[in-house]
Amino acid sequence: MSDHLIEQAKEILRRNDRGAYSVPTHGLYPFQWNWDSALSALGFSHFDEARAWTEIQTLFEHQWEDGMVPHIIFHEHDEGYFPGPDIWGTGAAVPTSGITQPPVAGFAASKMFDRASDTELATKQARALLPRIHAWHKWFFECRDPKGTGLVALIHPWESGRDNSVDWDDVFERVPTDDVQPFQRRDLQHADPDHRPTDEQYLRYIWLVQRFRSLGWDNVKLHDASPFQVVDPGFNAILQRSCAELAVLADRLNESEIAAESRSLASKGRAAMDTLWNDKLGQYLCFDRTAGKLIDSPSIAGLLAVFADTPEDKAKAIAQRIGDLSERCEYLVPSHDPDAAEFDGRRYWRGPVWLIVNYMIADGLYNASQVAMADRIRQDCLRLIHESGFAEYYDPTTGAPCGGTQFTWTAAMVIEILKTQQIAA
Ligand code: DGY
């Protein structure tokens, strides 16, 4: 049975393969997305190591001079997506967006190196990627943490990947909607409008893009100029984990300077995470940097935080919190607490389950010895696939598929889970 699922997953990866990069799915997302690519590479690495390395290599070919790795690379012209390169106006030779996304590439590259059977290829590729990934990590601390707190901020919800999370609702009130050039959304031609962000949210997304564009995409200015500056515990945990993994990779490649710097970035971030902890909920919270206060919103960001090295008591509390969520929904892990008034089981990041986040939470819980909950989450991933196919995300109450179909990173996670975690499918 698991062989059959793996074959189906591979077929999706092949279908969405454009040669040197993958699209997340046909139609809805016709370009290369940053964290989609890094996580998809993990899937490829189980059956085509060369292709897996190419995925990450292509992404880093479009790294900006300042170190940032953009969230979208517009490899080909396609009218079917908004906002396209003309709206971003970043001026890159191959157009890119001007913001970034969760830095999972360091984690992925390091994992791929560890399990490589073609060690010569892996060493060559990892050596080439190492300084680039490190430059991106340093960029975060320089440009998204200008006061040196140890925690980096998002300046646009799209950077989190959790575009319309309830976490941003209050902060978004601060983002104006005036002077936004008229536009036509394209996502609604490919997906059910009830599964997507609202028009009101799109206006604010585009206001921010226009604001950053007016500042020439100068990352020295963007953080302070953004009315949206949010510290996301899940995003920071991904950065910390990637820095820590990169340190290990650098040691193996005898790059002691990168190893030491990466270790120091990871522990600086790790030490600051306590400021985001909420004892009552038993999870981490987002922090509104502009207003200087924690955002009291029970979202998955504070559970994803367990992906980084987490103190035992906090990992245990997170496992318990997820156990509590399991009493109130059929499939783990909902992206928002089902009892919250804002919960919406089908709307993107306001309730649905995402396999990529499940994978990272389960990995973190497993490392923190919370094995039973890690196992339950992985089993739920496979139950969803059996019942609803390789969707973009799923309703945590009914398991219904939502968003795009035949999704690359969902397929990649299925291969990764089945190949590495010995779960009976
Ligand atoms: C979208 O277009 O929905 C993306 O999430 C933005 O990157």
Image (cartoon, helix red, strand yellow):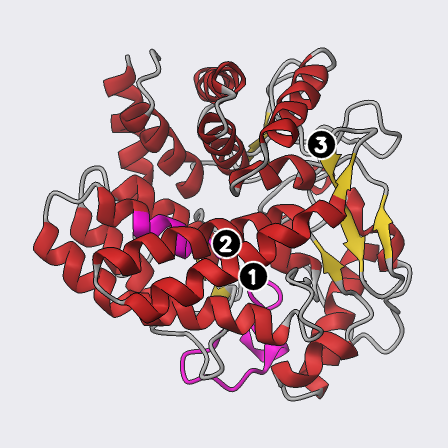
| Residue 206 coordinates in the image, percent (x, y) | 73, 68
Quick check: 253 above or below 396? below
| Residue 361 coordinates in the image, percent (x, y) | 53, 33
Does residue 394 belong to the magenta stretch?
A: no
Q: Secondary structure at mark 2?
A: loop
Q: Is the CB of mark 3 within 8 Å of ligand 1?
A: no
Label 3, residues with CA under 10 Å away: few <14, some 14-19, many ≥20: many
Main SS, magenta residues: loop
Q: Identify the residue at image location x=74%, y=64%.
A: 205
Badge 2 is on which residue? 29
Q: Of the residues tagged 3 and 2, which is closer to the observer? A: 3
Q: Is the CB of mark 2 within 8 Å of ligand 1?
A: yes
Q: Is the CB of mark 1 within 8 Å of ligand 1?
A: yes
Tell me the CA gap for discs 1 and 3.
24 Å
Question: In the figure, is residue 238 to the left or right of 174?
Answer: left
Tell me the CA gap for discs 3 and 2.
21 Å
